[in-house]
Image (cartoon, rainbow, N blue to C red):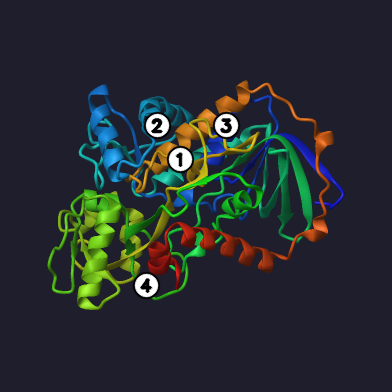
Amino acid sequence: MKNKDYIKTDAVIVGSGVAGLFSALCLPSNKEIIIITKEDLKECDSYLAQGGVCVLKDLDDFNCYFEDTMKAGHYENNPESVKVMIESSPEVIKTLIDLGVKFDTGDDGSYDYTREGAHRQNRILHHKDETGKEITATLLSIAKERKNITFVAQTTMIDLVKKDNTCYGIVCEDEYGEKGLIVADDIILATGGIGGLFNNSTNYPHITGDSFALALKHGVELQDINYIQIHPTTLYSKKDGRRFLISESVRGEGAVLLNENGERFTDELQPRDVVTNAICKEMEKFGTDHVYLNLPSMTSKEAQKRFPNIFEACMEEGYDMTKDNVPVTPSQHYLMGGIKTGINGETSMEHLYAVGETACNGVHGKNRLASNSLLESLVFSKRAADFIAKDKSKKDINELPDIDFNSYPEKEVREKEFKSIIMDEIKREDKDFYDKWCNN
């Protein structure tokens, strides 16, 4: 990008995960769309989602599903958002299937619904243990064929362009350090969470919450930025880098947690935060930094078929999860808070939308119910796209504020500033959480 040029488009989407891709596919085909992504197209956390995606199988399950979601969220959820998500789930899942997403079936050809922690019913569709990859790869392949969608990889959003609380576009920087401006009628932030700010996280390291730092800079309202989920079971390792998630669906299929004495110490199918707290107590009790997971309900062959990637990852570390005690430890996993939105992805700034993990519409409350993340991303990214399609308001690009590209700091300085802004906000909201999980 040349510093003196700008690109004009109908919509710019920041992020190439499920939320960003589904937003693009649900926008009208006559809208020109640019999707930028910080790294390669496939390096998004959506690809890492193992467990599955929830769906309302029948109306009889609505009250149970609603209550399971609310209870897991400590009843701090937005009931309207929960209702919208559950009611929209059959249509969204049908759309995925029509687009070619494959979900596992039983011997009779019917869908194999599984169960995870804090679910009282089997309502989770899955594709082996890589459901996120199956959905994201399918959406990406379709989006690449759409003539109205342009992808720009290795490009980072470094600022929002606003005037009078209206968003006009984004300033971005490519892999060579060239800065430029993308002007758009509507801007959708789908940048994921904040896992890259933590030493131990299941997220990709480049997922560093840039949207939240920019929201704080420009006065865009945030909500519950301190509501950060710690996943109870990641494969224990002393190596640097992303932590490998051992999906909750493994416990849903009968895996148990054991302490140093080989004793089972908790109900493995409680909400994630409850299981995490139980693990932390056992680690403190025995002076260790991990506990153990074992899957006695399956044979090696069965586990390899149901959880091929997890089984292989454990075997690479020397553990057969059906026979050996696999060391596991809690790690940062998911952000329930984020940029505050309504049920259509709208933020407190005009023409700026947030979807997926970047958004906080209150659906998860204080703690996310397992396998609600993919569903939430799909449901509310579609609603944002539909809302944008119906919006007839216009902006005059002649009202664009002047942009001084030379005023932006170099990458390393900018990243430190962004991290400091976000971590200070988390500390301000919840010092106890910060001291336990962030201050290391």
Q: Separation of disc 1 and disc 3 at Cα?
A: 13 Å
Which of the two labelled residues, at mark 1 and mark 3, occupies the earlier sequence position? 3
> What amino acid is labelled 4 in the image?
Ser
Q: Residues within 10 Å of mark 1 (few under 14, many from 20)?
A: many
The correct choice, above or below, for 176 with respect to 30 in the image is below
The correct choice, above or below, for 341 with respect to 413 in the image is above
Please state the horizontal and vertical placement of residue 314, each as a whole percent of the image.
Answer: 31, 65
Q: Is residue 73 left or right of residue 20?
A: left
Point out which mark residue 59 bears. none
Q: Is residue 92 left or right of residue 276?
A: right
> What amino acid is labelled 3 in the image?
Leu
For this rendering, which residue is in front, 202 or 394?
394
Q: Separation of disc 4 and disc 2 at Cα?
A: 36 Å
Q: Residue furthest right?
A: 4
Q: Which residue is mark 3?
A: 25
Q: Which residue is mark 4?
A: 237
Give the foreground label among 4 and 2.
2
Q: Which residue is mark 1?
A: 135
SS at badge 3: helix
Please state the horizontal and vertical placement of residue 81, each as a whole percent of the image.
Answer: 41, 32
